[in-house]
Amino acid sequence: MEQTLVQNGAVKKVQFLPAVNDDHGGVIIELEKPMDPNVFHIMLRSSLRQWKLQGKKVVWIKLPIELVNLVESAVKEGFWYHHAEPHYLMLVYWIPKIENTIPGNASHRVRIGAIVLNEKRELLVVQECSGKMKGKGIWKIPTGVVEEGEDIFEGAVREVKEETGIDTEFLEVLAFRQMHKSFFGKSDLFFICMMRPLTFNLQKQDLEIEAAQWMSLDEYAAQPFIQKHGIFKYIKDLCFAKAEESYPGFTPVPIKSYFGEPTSYLYFNEDGLVQETSAIYL
Amino acid sequence: MEQTLVQNGAVKKVQFLPAVNDDHGGVIIELEKPMDPNVFHIMLRSSLRQWKLQGKKVVWIKLPIELVNLVESAVKEGFWYHHAEPHYLMLVYWIPKIENTIPGNASHRVRIGAIVLNEKRELLVVQECSGKMKGKGIWKIPTGVVEEGEDIFEGAVREVKEETGIDTEFLEVLAFRQMHKSFFGKSDLFFICMMRPLTFNLQKQDLEIEAAQWMSLDEYAAQPFIQKHGIFKYIKDLCFAKAEESYPGFTPVPIKSYFGEPTSYLYFNEDGLVQETSAIYL
């Protein structure tokens, strides 16, 4: 982008960085090609002046990791880090004098714990090779991190399959725990999921799992560690409640968005809602 | 850190970067003081050689934004971005030849929607000043982003207070939606919360809220937009279900962790669990 300016009687070509407007009064610069850091710095200054005059609020710069040599110039101009992914860094700058209303970074990781009960009241349990439970001889339910872009129900089925070789059908979320300062100062949402086994032959993963087995619910519950400690005690109680088929969890139902966003899933008590709404609308 | 090496008969001082070991076979470099980029680069190379010989797996470098001039050297040595917060950038390097098992970055933002029903079957509703609902004349429940380190129930109480001036007591999570690619490619977990109003005089926030009022549930539900569209239809159904007091949600209960982590909250159907476990243990 180029613009002609008359300064002290001399005509001068001023170049601005290529930017697109966002929906919230901001502009986004996405650079892809290499650029001399000094040229970038000068263009960024002129562009910032321009955007201030135009009344813009926020300026975003998305820099691929290959353009790491431009980061310092942006920070010198007052930009700060918003977030980073392996292949890029997002920098941000707030123009108005009032307090910034820039949306935050992602704040939570999502994990699942899978309660897989067979018809003989046996629970699918594992011992882990590493982490805090290592070498303690404690049998626990399979757990794992839900991947970026993965649904909770998908992540639960995948983790059980990876760790134990068992195929499962996702049934419900029975409970979830929110914990802060869990990793890198970030928070953790841990969803306890009810699953139905579709196969029964164990084939444990060697990298993460020391041992896997089907264990009677009573034997599992009798472990002193399980009986005593916070989340483990609740998981045990949920196992018994579900073995009696009495505890109402949340099931995922696909919903379409009005604004053309991708299909998402709402987890709720389907029975509770269906009965109620039909009673009202009849 | 300094070490004496004998190379080609000459005694040479080699300096390593200060690092501490983590629990997973890795090392963490946390620099705080300014450093010449060339000196940093040389020390990083020697240190990396050293850690490879020691069989380390992962090297983390946490650089405060003030040390932005060191980022380029780290990337040149093969480091990539792991995550960033306004005041620092975390870089990471994987040493072994096998596929990396580095834990992912935070993947989700957490938002709440608050169903605040008074005893006259009136719902607390707002119209927003900006965003996708702007200027459409649609009355909706208050929504907002849960802050870093904030509990879902705290965030819901805070948002309702900020947007409408109404004090509330958090009761239950009624449902939650998981949606992907919601902002910067990240995912969104939206918790629909049931709240009891403790005060009734509206005092709307001017920055984000165009209008706020108590609206009869029937009038709210009669809005064509609400009747038709995915998540809005479900929220309406949940309002009616709760007005009849029949729908079982999840309530937060504090739990202590075995491993000395901070107190966290488990959200589950307390009635469902208590009845069941007392039945079993009696």
Image: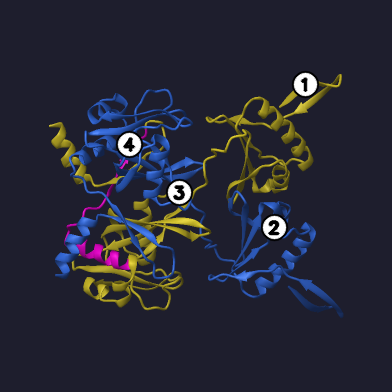
Chain colours: A yellow, B blue
Along the line of sight, which residue is nearer the eye, B17 or B8?
B17
The CA distance from mark 1 to mark 2 is 40 Å
Query: Which residue lies under the disc numbered 3?
Result: B108
Chain letter behind tag 2:
B
- Secondary structure under the numbered disc 1 in the rendered image: strand
Give the structural element (helix, strand or loop) at label 4: helix
Q: Which residues are magenta?
A: A232-257
- How crowded pointer 1 is (Cα within 10 Å; few <14, some 14-19, many 20+) is rated as few
Residue B231, labelled with which disc?
4
Q: Are marks 1 and 2 in contact (CB under 8 Å)?
A: no
**Which amino acid is tagged 4?**
Ile
Q: State the CA–CA distance, disc 1 to disc 3.
A: 45 Å
Residue A4's mark? 1
Distance between the alpha carbons at the discs numbered 4 and 1: 50 Å
Closer to the camera in the image, B231 or B164: B164
Residue A94 placement, left or right of B14: left
Q: Position of residue B93 (x, y in %)?
A: 62, 61
Q: Residue A148 at x, y = what percent?
A: 46, 50
Q: Given the image, what chain letter belongs to the residue carrying mark 3? A: B
- Residue B169 to residue A60: above or below: below
In the figure, B198 relative to B224: above or below? below
Are the residues tagged 2 and 4 within 8 Å (C-beta)?
A: no
